[in-house]
Amino acid sequence: MKKNQSIVIGNWKMNPQTLVEAKRIVTKTKTVARTLEHTLVVACPPFPFVSLVASKRNSGASGNRVHAGVQNAFFEEQGAYTGEVSTHMLADIGVEYVIVGHSERRARGETDVEVSKKVAAVTQSGMTAVLCVGETVRDAQGAYLNTLREQIKASLQAFPKRQLSQLIIAYEPVWAIGAKEAMTPVLVREMVIFVKKVISDTYGQEEALAVPVLYGGSVNFRNAADIMTEGHVDGFLVGRESVNVPGFIELIKVVDAVSAKK
Ligand code: PGA
């Protein structure tokens, strides 16, 4: 990642409900994304709408467009896995980013072991894994830090150093997702340092500093600038605001303006 570049990843979750609406979001977002010089914009729509952003022709080219992402993928290569989608299929249609281990999936039973297999499958297929981590609750004694450390380590079990350039960490405190307020910039800053420390303990400091760490949890165009500057994040994983066109457009413009000054 370049010094003055940031990443904004839109996690559309199970929205919107129609193809027409999905097209509208993509078209409007593209119009603005192509004017930005310091922000890489990724949209992760639900599978039925992925072709609106994924295109083999585009994949790999940097900047000035909306990059294609998805919200999940399966770790097995192929076969009798009803309802699953392989990383090879996704890479083949031009998907570049895969969100892995989102708390809403972990809450429905996805384990660290499965997450680690997914991270491996995504990167082996040549895409970038956006690994979501974050504590569910914070306790006064700081036990959540241990929980987070263990979650990161287990989610990256056996992940090789040579593939770190295909990894993005999205730190998302679960209690701040879908909430009224985001985490305060000061706390975000502490947590970004902590996440980098955990990565550095395993892979080395230089390598850890190169892994982008995003913040996610109730980000919008109003709080984005402060979280970026004071929180020292490399960008955002955005839920609700990513399907709210006016808000998302404002958000990516704000991020771009802040990144230009980095
Ligand atoms: P939110 O979701 O921005 O709606 O809080 C973030 C996420 O779940 O990634």
Image (tube, rainbow, N blue to C red):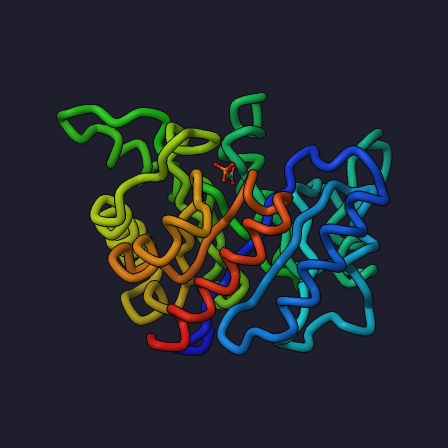
* Image-based side of 110 in relation to 95, left or right: left
- Residue drawn 47% across the image and 69% down it: 256
Please determine whether, in this image, residue 52 is positioned above or below residue 262: above
Residue 166 position within the rendered picture, expressed as x and y whole percent measured from the top left: 54, 63
Please determine whether, in this image, residue 156 is positioned above or below residue 140: below
Residue 81 position within the rendered picture, expressed as x and y whole percent measured from the top left: 81, 32
Relative to the observer, which residue lies in front, 218 or 60?
Answer: 218
Please determine whether, in this image, residue 159 is positioned above or below residue 18: below
* Image-based side of 234 in relation to 13, left or right: left
Q: Dividing the picture into quarters, in which one does residue 171 lie?
A: top left
Furthest-top residue in this view: 108
Residue 24 position within the rendered picture, expressed as x and y whole percent measured from the top left: 77, 51
Q: Dividing the picture into quarters, in which one does residue 196 lie?
A: bottom left
- Residue drawn 74% across the image and 41% down it: 46
Furthest-left residue in this view: 141
Residue 176 position within the rendered picture, expressed as x and y whole percent measured from the top left: 39, 33
* Image-based side of 63 in relation to 22, left or right: left
